[in-house]
């Protein structure tokens, strides 16, 4: 017997949620969610270009910078994430996103008002708590707005907001910091999120509020049942491990790239931040949509490509990142970073599309939250800390070059991540769930 909604309708008889919207409405909603993610990654990325000025003012080590830039943020992001994700799976995702936007924007404002390092770290904890509600609820809505054969492209566009946020955080934030100081960069970074929160509240649709929405039954699944179901899926577990390894790299050595350019290559702050922002943005804008399009096409032939495609990309990107950190020419380093970023940007979007295909509609936000918050707890929490500690240890013998060697060592995480996603792809066919 088919399960029923509270209204007594069989779930299989309900129309899919994406059928409730026109193509124009879907892309309009995606544009709003793009702004949400842009604000989130503006507030998140601006910290990397401010680490050196903060280090100079408060006289702290790279280990402490890693703690501030990653650990204190990631711990609360992970702890707060699961309750917020369950709320997103059971309630109004528009409300979740609106409140999250307000929270992380206000706490970014407090970062700019901090007068001690520990005040700054405490405000950073608040940013992490606010951001815990952004991506899972947004991706859950995207999966409801778009049919499965269009999700990789939609998610790729959504992930493109990382680029927009990084351009604003690195490029604009770096130039503001160079001209007016790091505190002013935080203050200005806080403003867009408050405006976007109003846009979300007034324009975004919640399918669960519309008659016949197919998400109503998700309200009856307990958190323990959702987690137990996900643990039974080998493809989901290996995707989780692969994501953790990927984010160990993305949150770890990547946050120290501005410091590498300033400290090892002796580039000035304003030019380094602008160049890095332009190169990263161009590479991501080129790689992300192409990767989403390719993943959609390949997955129509064999769904396993949703996982095999990122496996191929991560395996290819690792050696290019290692080469980038080994060079001394700013031009050569930027060329390698461009190539490596194109490849990573192309491969990553289909990771989420694969997870949406195997997790089941009743637990989308929870599945994404577990991946993001495990990745953030270990990747965001341990990655910057490990990179900073390794840099401090190697710098005792190699001076400024210690940071270079630390970053080169961390690139080995990408081939390990690739292996996990290859295994995930092999297990996917038996785990697919609508």
Image: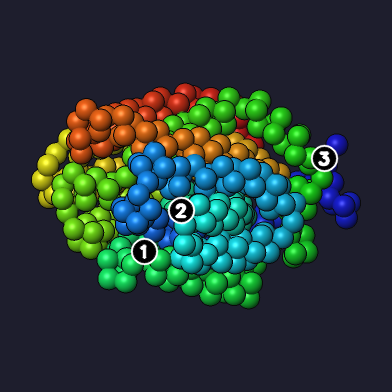
Q: Is residue 351 left or right of residue 278?
A: right
Residue 371, percent across and down?
A: 56, 39
Residue located beneath label 1 in the image:
182
**Mark 3–mark 1 CB contact (< 8 Å):** no
Task: Specify few, some or many for label 1: CA neighbours under 10 Å numbering under 14, 14-19, or 20 or more.
Answer: many
Q: Which residue is mark 2?
A: 117
Disc with the residue nearer the chain's start (2 vs 3): 3
Q: In which quarter of the view is residue 264 placed?
A: top left
Query: Quick check: 32 left or right of 362?
Result: left
Q: Quadrant of the C terminus?
A: top right
User: What is the spatial separation of the Cα atoms under label 2 and label 1, in whole angstroms?
Assistant: 13 Å
In the displayed structure, 191 sits above or below 401; it is below
Mark 2 vs mark 1: which is more N-terminal?
2
Q: With respect to residue 101, does 323 lie above or below?
A: above
User: Compared to 338, does 319 lie above or below?
Assistant: above
Residue contact between numbered discs 2 and 1, judged by CB atoms under 8 Å: no
Q: Position of residue 405 (x, y in %)?
A: 24, 31
Q: Nearer the viewer, mark 2 or mark 1?
A: 2
**Frontmost residue, 118 versus 177:** 118
| Kind of element beneath mark 3 | loop
- Which residue is drawn at the image coordinates 40% and 66% (left, top)? 183
Left or right for 38, reference 410: right
Q: Comparing marks 3 and 1, which lies closer to the viewer?
A: 1
> Under tag 2, what secondary structure?
helix
The image's mark for residue 209 is: none
| Residue 228 in view here | yes
Secondary structure at badge 1 equals helix
User: Of 339 and 291, which appears nearest the observer?
Assistant: 339
User: To which residue does mark 3 refer?
Assistant: 2
Q: CA distance from mark 3 to mark 1?
A: 58 Å
The residue sitting at 10% across, 45% down in the picture is 329
Apparent side of residue 60 relative to residue 273 in the rendered image (left or right)? right
């Amino acid at each position: 017997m088919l399960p029923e909604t509270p209204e007594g309708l069989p779930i299989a008889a309900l129309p899919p949620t994406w059928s409730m919207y026109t193509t124009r409405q879907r892309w309009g909603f995606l544009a709003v969610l793009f702004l949400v993610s842009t604000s989130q990654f503006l507030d998140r990325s601006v910290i990397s270009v401010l680490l050196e000025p903060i280090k100079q003012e408060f006289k702290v080590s790279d280990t402490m910078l890693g703690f501030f830039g990653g650990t204190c943020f990631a711990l609360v992001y992970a702890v707060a994430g699961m309750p917020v994700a369950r709320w997103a799976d059971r309630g109004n995702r528009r409300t979740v996103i609106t409140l999250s936007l307000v929270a992380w924007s206000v706490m970014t404002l407090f970062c700019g008002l901090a007068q001690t390092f520990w005040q700054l770290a405490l405000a950073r904890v608040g940013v992490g708590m606010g951001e815990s509600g952004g991506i899972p609820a947004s991706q859950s809505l995207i999966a409801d707005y778009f049919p499965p054969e269009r999700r990789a492209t939609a998610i790729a566009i959504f992930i493109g907001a990382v680029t927009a946020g990084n351009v604003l955080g690195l490029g604009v934030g770096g130039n503001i910091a160079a001209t007016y100081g790091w505190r002013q960069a935080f203050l200005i970074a806080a403003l867009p999120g408050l405006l976007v929160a109003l846009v979300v509240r007034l324009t975004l649709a919640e399918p669960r509020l519309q008659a016949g929405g197919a998400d109503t039954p998700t309200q009856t699944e307990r958190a323990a049942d959702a987690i137990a179901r996900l643990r039974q899926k080998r493809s989901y577990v290996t995707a989780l491990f692969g994501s953790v390894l990927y984010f160990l790299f993305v949150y770890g050595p990547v946050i120290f790239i501005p410091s590498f350019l300033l400290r090892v290559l002796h580039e000035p702050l304003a030019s380094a931040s602008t160049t890095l922002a332009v190169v990263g943005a161009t590479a991501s804008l080129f790689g992300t949509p192409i990767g989403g399009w390719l993943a959609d096409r390949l997955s129509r032939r064999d769904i396993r490509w949703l996982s095999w495609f990122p496996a191929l990309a991560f395996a290819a990107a690792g050696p290019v990142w290692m080469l980038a950190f080994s060079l001394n020419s700013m031009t050569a380093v930027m060329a390698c970073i461009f190539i490596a970023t194109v490849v990573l940007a192309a491969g990553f979007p289909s990771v989420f599309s694969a997870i949406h295909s195997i997790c089941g509609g009743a637990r989308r936000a929870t599945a994404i939250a577990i991946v993001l918050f495990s990745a953030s707890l270990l990747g965001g929490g341990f990655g910057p800390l490990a990179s900073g500690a390794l840099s401090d240890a190697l710098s005792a013998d190699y001076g400024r070059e210690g940071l270079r060697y630390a970053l080169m060592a961390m690139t080995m995480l990408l081939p390990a991540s690739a292996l996990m996603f290859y295994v995930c792809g092999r297990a996917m066919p038996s785990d697919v769930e609508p």
